[in-house]
Amino acid sequence: MTEERSKTIAFVVYPGLTLLDLAGPLQVLTPLAVAGYRVLTVGERATPHDTDTPLAITPTHTFADVPTPDVVVVPGGAAPTLRAMADERLLDYLRTASAHATVLASVCTGALLLGAAGLLDGRRATTHWVMRDQLAALGATPVAERWVEDGPVLTAAGVAAGIDMALHLVTRLEGADIARTIQFAVEYDPEPPLGPLDWSRAPHAEFGALRSAWLREGLADHPDLLARLGGDSVA
Amino acid sequence: MTEERSKTIAFVVYPGLTLLDLAGPLQVLTPLAVAGYRVLTVGERATPHDTDTPLAITPTHTFADVPTPDVVVVPGGAAPTLRAMADERLLDYLRTASAHATVLASVCTGALLLGAAGLLDGRRATTHWVMRDQLAALGATPVAERWVEDGPVLTAAGVAAGIDMALHLVTRLEGADIARTIQFAVEYDPEPPLGPLDWSRAPHAEFGALRSAWLREGLADHPDLLARLGGDSVA
C-alpha cells in the first residue's frame, strides 16, 4: 500500500488515563496494520506516562509527529481526565486533528475531552454511566447506549465498552469479515461470571460520591469548569 | 492494613506480550488496593518493554523486588511468548513464586509459560483456542472453558477471557459484592456488535497457519521445544 493511501489511526495518551480504555480498542484495531493502516499512539511527549494502574505506558509518537490522523481515539479516566479537560495542548491536538479526521472516537470519559475541545456541540454522545449527565454541559445530548455514532463522532460508554465500539469501527472501516476474524483473535466471547450488569442494582450513591471527588480533584484549578460540570452540587 | 497482612498481586511483564492479556485483568484487580492488596507489575527490568501493539509498557518492579507474591498473573502473546518459554529468568521467577503463591493465573498463551516452568503437570488448564492442543505437550489436560481452576492454577482462554477470569478471581478473593462494584466501575456489560463467537465458523485453517508461523519464529533456537509443541507438523 502506498504511503498516500495508508490511513492513520492515532490513540491519544495523557497522564493518568484508564489503561483498559486504551488497551481494549488498541488491541482490536492494531491488526488493521495488515490492511494498510498505520496504527500508533500519540502523546505530548514520547516518554513514559502513568496510568490508573501500576503500569506506565510510552506512546510511539508525539502530537507534533502526527498532526493529521484519519481516526483519533481518546481514552478516558477519573480525576486525571478531568484535569486534562484544561490541557490546552491536548485540546489543540484534538481540534487540529478534527479538521482532517473522518472518525473522532472516545472511550469512557474520553468524551469529556472531545467536549472540552468543542467537538460535541449538538452531537448525540455517550460516556461512562457515572459521568453521562455531564455531557449536556458540554453541548452534547447524552445517550445511554453502548456506543453512539453521530457524524464523525463515535463515543463509547465506560471502559470495557471500548472493545465493543472498536469492533464496530473495524466493521465500518473494513467490513464484518475482518471484524469477526479479530474477534476470534482476541477470543472476545464474553462470560461475565456474575452475568451482565443489572442496572437496577447500579451503586449510584457510591459512584456519585466518587464523581464528586474526581470533579473536585481534577478541576480544583478550574472553578468555572467545575461549576459547569456540576460543581454546585458537589461543593 | 499492616504490611504483614497485605497480599501482593504481581502481573508478569516480558517483551512482546499481548497488551490486552495484561491490561484487562490489571484494570479489574487494581481496585483491590482499597481492600489492602499490593497490586504491581514485575519484569526482569523496570524499563520500557515492547508489546504486540504500538505501545511500550514499564512495570513498577523487577522480579528481584517481588520474589514471593501471593497471586501471580502471566499474560500471553504470539511468537514472543513462545520465545519466553525458553527465558530461564522468567521461568525461574515463576517457579520461585509458585512455592509461596496461592494463585498462579495465566491469560491466553501465558499458560504455556506456566507449563514451560513445570507448573501445569497433571493440571486441567486452558489457553487461547489456537494453542489449546499444545497444553498436552506440557503435561496439562486441555479444557475448552472460559477459565479453568485446578488447585492454585487458574488459567483463562484467549486475550479477552482474562477480564472474565479476573472478575471471578475478585469474587474468590474478596466476594461477589466487590466484584460487582468493579464490574460497574469498568462498565463490563458486553455487547459484541457481531454477537458472541460462532465457533462453527472458527477460522481454523487461517489461525493454524499463524500458529505454525508463531511456533517456528518463537522457537527457532529451541528445536526440542518446537518438536514437542508440534514442530513436526509445522516444519
Image: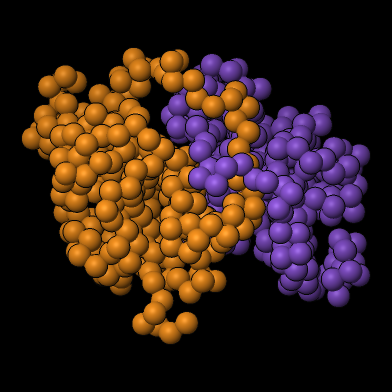
Chain colours: A orange, B purple
Q: Quadrant of the C terminus of chain A?
A: top left
Q: Residue at x 45, y 26 (%)?
A: B184
Nearer to the camera, B167 or B102: B167
Q: Residue at x 34, y 62 (%)?
A: A71
As drawn, A225 above or below A63: above
Q: Is residue B8 left or right of residue B147?
A: left
Q: Residue at x 28, y 56 (%)?
A: A152
Q: Is residue A19 left or right of residue B59?
A: left
As drawn, A221 above or below A174: above
Quadrant in which residue B105 is drawn: top right
Q: Residue at x 51, y 38 (%)?
A: B191
Nearer to the camera, A96 or A57: A96
Residue B26, image x, y percentages: 54, 40
Q: Is residue B172 visible?
A: yes
Task: Name, please, the residue furthest toward the left.
Answer: A224
As drawn, A98 above or below B161: below
Residue B81, image x, y percentages: 70, 59
Nearer to the camera, B100 or A24: A24
